[in-house]
Image (cartoon, rainbow, N blue to C red):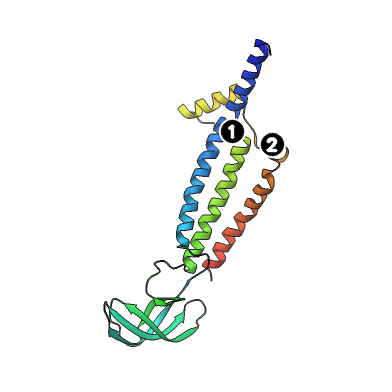
Amino acid sequence: MTSTGAADQYVARRDYIFRRMFGWIVGVGIVAIGCATAWTGVGYLDGHVTVSARPGSVVVQSCKPADPGYTCTGTFEDDATGEKTQGATLATDRDAIPNAALPALKTDDGYTATDDGELTTGKLSRALFWLGLTDLLWLVGAFFLLTGYQPRPPLHYGPFIGVWRERERRFGRVTLEEGWHVVRHERGPALPILVVVAVMCPVLFVGSWLVGGA
């Protein structure tokens, strides 16, 4: 290869990288934010994949001292279904008069006054929302990373905007149309994955809304 050919190859490679660098950086940032939202969503699950506690209240029949606190017996009423279960026993930190309604959760192990370590419908709804947001961020971030897509610089000026506009003037930018062409024709194996991720996004958001209203 002649020196002229090597120089031309270097310039072409440099222009290719500089034309896409801003899009790649933005993509990494979006994916990183998605990782943070994923951590938040998974945290709400408390290690469960299905609801492990149903919110409701225990209508007290009697309470007696225990170590520590009190043990109250009564009837549990599910907030969502209205189903009543007699003989519910709830450990609390305070005494209660007969017919008082104490907030409680029905779990596989009985009844509890706190949701520590349990997955309620409210927690599941919030988890699905955050995971839906994660899905959307990863979808957008993947598009930036796969294509180097760069939005058009804003019209107003500033130190960073000036650099952005100068880079576009020198090297051009990957437009949205060009980015979609790259995904379809040059990143073919990634396209089915992007389609699945795109479908999951509304599914998770709708699931969050449905569970929250349950």
Q: Quadrant of residue 185?
A: top right
Across the whole image, how many numbered discs are drawn on residues?
Answer: 2
x%, y% of residue 160? 47, 29
Is residue 160 toward the left or the right of residue 100 in the image?
right
Q: Quadrant of residue 27?
A: top right
Label 1 secondary element: loop
- CA distance separating discs 2 and 1: 18 Å
- Residue that protrudes farthest toward the right in the picture: 185
Above/below status of 110 relative to 177: below
Q: Amino acid at mark 1?
A: Arg
Q: Amino acid at mark 2?
A: Val
- For residue 116, the mark is none
Name the residue carrying label 2: 182
x%, y% of residue 6? 65, 15
Q: Quadrant of residue 77?
A: bottom left
x%, y% of residue 204? 58, 59
Any part of residue 158 in sight? no
- Residue that protrudes farthest toward the front in the picture: 1
Label 2 secondary element: helix
Q: Are marks 2 and 1 in contact (CB under 8 Å)?
A: no
- For residue 152, the mark is 1
Above/below status of 23 relative to 135: above
